[in-house]
Image: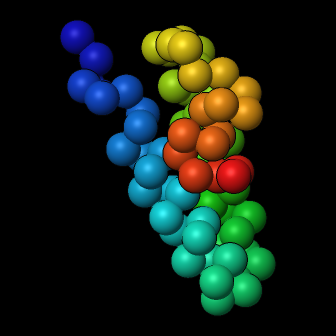
Amino acid sequence: MSKYVNGYFPKIEYWSGKLNEAIASLDEDGIEKCTSKLLYFVGKQNSTYGGPLKGDAFLRSIGVIK
């Protein structure tokens, strides 16, 4: 059984929020770190769990793009 019951969505939501904070405060290092974390966890979600959310639809669902 996976240690992440809800997949990686909680981590993706957490880092999305942190990215929004970094953008609001113009923290370039924070933006870079959060973007890196999001790319990692989105990749893990897709490779581990797959699912119907792919590409732009997935990024829209977590608020990364509008």
Q: Is residue 64 left or right of residue 41?
A: right
User: Eyeballing the image, is 63 above or below 49?
Assistant: below
Residue at x 58% of width, y 22% of height: 53
Residue 40 appears in the rendering? no
Q: Is residue 48 left or right of residue 65?
A: left
When asked about the image quadrant of residue 20, the answer is bottom right
Number of residue marks: 0
User: Eyeballing the image, is 39 above or below 65?
Assistant: above
User: Which is nearer the eye, 55 or 14?
Assistant: 55
- For the N terminus, the quadrant is top left
When asked about the image quadrant of residue 27, the answer is bottom right
Residue at x 55% of width, y 14% of height: 52
Residue 56 position, x and y percent, is: 73, 33
User: Eyeballing the image, is 31 above or below 49?
Assistant: below
Residue 36 position, x and y percent, is: 69, 51
- Please, which residue is most extreme toward the bottom here? 25
User: Which is nearer the eye, 27 or 53?
Assistant: 53
Residue 55 position, x and y percent, is: 72, 27
Residue at x 74% of width, y 64% of height: 32
- Please, which residue is most extreme toward the front here? 66
User: Which is nearer the eye, 53 or 25?
Assistant: 53
Residue 64 position, x and y percent, is: 64, 52
Residue 20 appears in the rendering? yes
Q: Is residue 15 left or right of residue 2?
A: right
Q: State how the image is colored.
A: rainbow
